[in-house]
Image: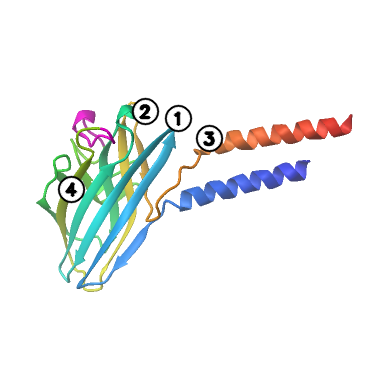
Amino acid sequence: MNKTIRVLALSCLAWCATSVSAHAASITIASSSTSSFDIYWSLVVGGTELAAVGNFDITVTDSYVDFGVTLTNNTLASANENVHAIGLNADPEGTRLSMLDSGYYFKSLGLDQKFAGYKTIDICAWASQNCAGGAQGANLPGAGALVSSDSFAFRLFGDFTDGITLSNFVVKFQGDLGSYEFGGSTDRPTSTPEPASAILLLTGAAAALLGTERRRCR
């Protein structure tokens, strides 16, 4: 029985590790080229899925990189969890940012910004106050609201003769459920239990095994 529980625990840990690693995204784009891709964010909190998708159109030149972004908050509006900020790392980092076309919500940019859980993020775009947080009502609302998508464009200056690598795409939600920052993936997510749910699953399975073993001993 103990061996079975150990195997089950290891399986659970493997599932958790896979769940976390699935939130990694790294994209390399050569100079004098373009790329379009989607980043998906998904996290289940208390039975509510915090979900968003970012559509990125990237153009790389030797001296700057242009970003066109459309961000959609797919979380149910009734959850009142709005998107406050998105961020990413760039290699090379770049030297200066310029907003080319601000959105209705997303109007501010910054380099080397503090993003909870990620130390610093090379590029951050936010809807209100600053990258770390802001007024809930000024953030991008969820599905069912009058507007749940926002588009904006900006330019990153620097030396990109060897291209650019973009990674650590992160999002910040704020609302009634709290504030959450987590990474995104190029893979469209499927709803998965929270780590706490995985622990409950493991506990329930262990209890079932104990019950089976007790019946065998009678």
Q: Nearer the viewer, mark 1 or mark 3?
A: 1
Dot label at residue 133: none
Q: Pick out the residue farthest to the right.
A: 218
Which amino acid type is shown beneath numbered disc 4?
Answer: Ser
| 159 or 10, nearer to the observer | 10
Circle 4/circle 1 CB separation < 8 Å: no
Position of 97 relative to 4 (above/below) = below
Tell me the kind of residue under disc 2.
Leu
| The magenta stretch spans residue 136 | yes
Name the secondary structure under disc 4: strand
Left or right side of 26 for 130: left
Q: Which residue is mark 3?
A: 196
Choose top left, top right, bottom left or bottom right for residue 33.
Answer: bottom left
In the rendered image, residue 148, in percent from the top left (x then y), is placed at 23, 38
Tell which of 140 and 166 is nearer to you: 140
Residue hosting label 2: 177
Nearest to N terminus: mark 4 or mark 3: 4
Q: What residue is drawn where x is 65% and y is 43%?
A: 9
Earlier in the chain: of badge 1 and badge 3, it is: 1
Cβ atoms at labels 4 and 3 below 8 Å apart? no
Q: Which mark is residue 46?
A: 1
Q: Label 1 amino acid?
A: Gly
User: What stretch of residues is rendered in magenta?
Assistant: 133-144
Mark 2 residue crowding within 10 angstroms, few (<14) / some (14–19) / many (20+): some
Tell me the CA gap for discs 4 and 2.
25 Å
